[in-house]
Image (cartoon, helix red, strand yellow):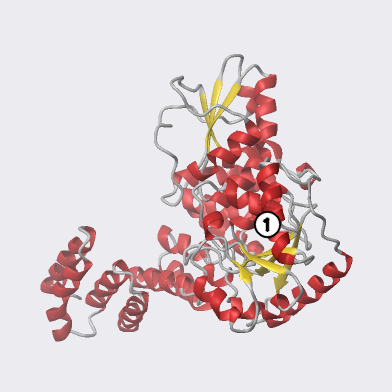
Amino acid sequence: MASALVLETCRAATARIAAGDPWGGEALLAGALARAPRDPNLLYVAGNCALARGDHSLALERYQRSVAAAPTFVAALVNLGFVLRTAQRLAEARDVLAHAVTLEPGHRLAWTNLVSTYVNEGEPAAGEVVARAALSLHPADPVLRWNLSLLLLEQGRWREGWSEYRHRFDTPVVARPPGVEGIARLEHPEQITAGDMVLCHGEQGLGDEILFASVLAEFVDAARSRGGEVMLAANPRLAGLFSRTFGLPTRGAAQPAWVVPIGDLPRFFRTTADDFPQRGAYLSVDPAAVAEMRATLRARAAGRPLVGIAWRGGSAYTHSVHRTIPVGQWLPILRHDALFVSLAYHDATPEIAAVAAEGITIVDLPGVTTADDYQRTCELVAALDLVITVPTSVVHAAGGVGTPCWVVMDQRAAWRECSCDSSIPWYPLTHRRFIRPKTARVWADTMGDVATALQTWRTSHSASPSKY
């Protein structure tokens, strides 16, 4: 049993963490750890300090030592499982977290961490089993229900998935915009009556809003058929593009009768596989701006096709490790006779310089791809003949403007890119998936497949001055 002094030190250090001062917490622990370097409580709180500072490697080492000293210390097991999960050491994370729920079957945080190890990991059916076991103990937990929704959507079980997806705003992960408190959330378009104004607000990332906007016109038609109207509060970078496409008023002085997050719209109109329309573009860009950009690029291309590429996507939280293919691994593709255009939304100068040393030119237009007005990026995408990209917002930009797009991806993917074949349900006429096999540790074979497909595509492709 821990001494009173150890427990008091742990409480004081934990208070420092809560106050935003994990460094001060570590300073408080230093003397006690020097005297008792194997104390599991001190090691656990020291791990929490390291985690709060963002030093996951040190946190991992401290949690491992804590668990080694006290194998039934559930709190340490849970945090160890979390750190292993973020390090993509999934088998170890699952073993640790399964041990935690065996020791304490009702431990909610252990279950939520365990379920999260299956989301976006290419194992949705197995994850669903775990999620439902967790929900049998914690049926109202919003994080568990949201994770279940993601696992169901990965399987293409749209109706079930959307019914649980609505719980995302009850989690600490997805935030609703300010100013919608107190406005009733629309549960179905049939609730709209004559004169009702419905506020549809954006959420999550640019790519998500563009994807969900594929359903917006249907929702507007449904609202107007009942005498209502829709106003839109989109991400500021999408405001111009959406205004041009949908012509909806932005939020004004009038108080809406209803609010609907844009991510709720598929729940009304995309509940089976047959609900996904066989269509191309659904967003409007300025044809004159597209034509001008295309003419400029074609002047540099000298008859070669225009191919946009994006090789990095996401963040550490959103699986960037599986959504990034170093540009050097694109050489089998980049050696083809095409004008390649960077669609990177980060500073790609070092990477572009690296392939330039191989005699390969990638056109970089950072003033377009990082513009505050995302319509500029969409105009560039519309000006291209083909886009080859990892899973990122460019996938949805291409879908929105109708440019053919090849998505090079890992088996471990989010529901947006999942399907039972090589297509993507949201963009059935334009998009094709190239998937790295589950057993592959490198991208070489997959990039070789893309290069071969590009050769076939080039043989049959005849670039035209205009796509409009």
Q: Is residue 442 visible?
A: yes
| Quadrant housing the C terminus | top right
Left or right of 39? Residue 131 is right
> Residue 63, percent across and down?
33, 77
Query: Who is closer to the viewer here, 444 or 269?
Result: 444
How far across and down, in percent of the image, does residue 50 sit?
29, 73
The image shows residue 191 at horizontal and vertical percentages of 61, 23
Q: In the figure, residue 450 lies in which quadrant?
A: bottom right
The quadrant of the rendering that contains the N terminus is bottom left
Q: Is residue 407 shown left or right of residue 365?
A: right
Q: Amino acid type of disc 1?
A: Thr
Tell how many labels: 1
Task: Work out whether residue 398 can be spotted.
Answer: no
**Which residue is found at the position 57% from the left and 62% from the top?**
119
Neighbour tally class for label 1: few under 14, some 14-19, many 20 plus, Cα within 10 Å:
few
Residue located 14% across and 70% down the image:
9
Name the outermost residue toward the right: 460
- Which residue is nearer to you in this view: 306 or 39? 306
Q: Quadrant of residue 436?
A: bottom right
Residue drawn at (19%, 73%) of the image: 26
What residue is pinned by disc 1?
296
Q: Nearer the viewer, residue 464 or 314?
A: 464
Residue 165, placed above or below residue 342: above
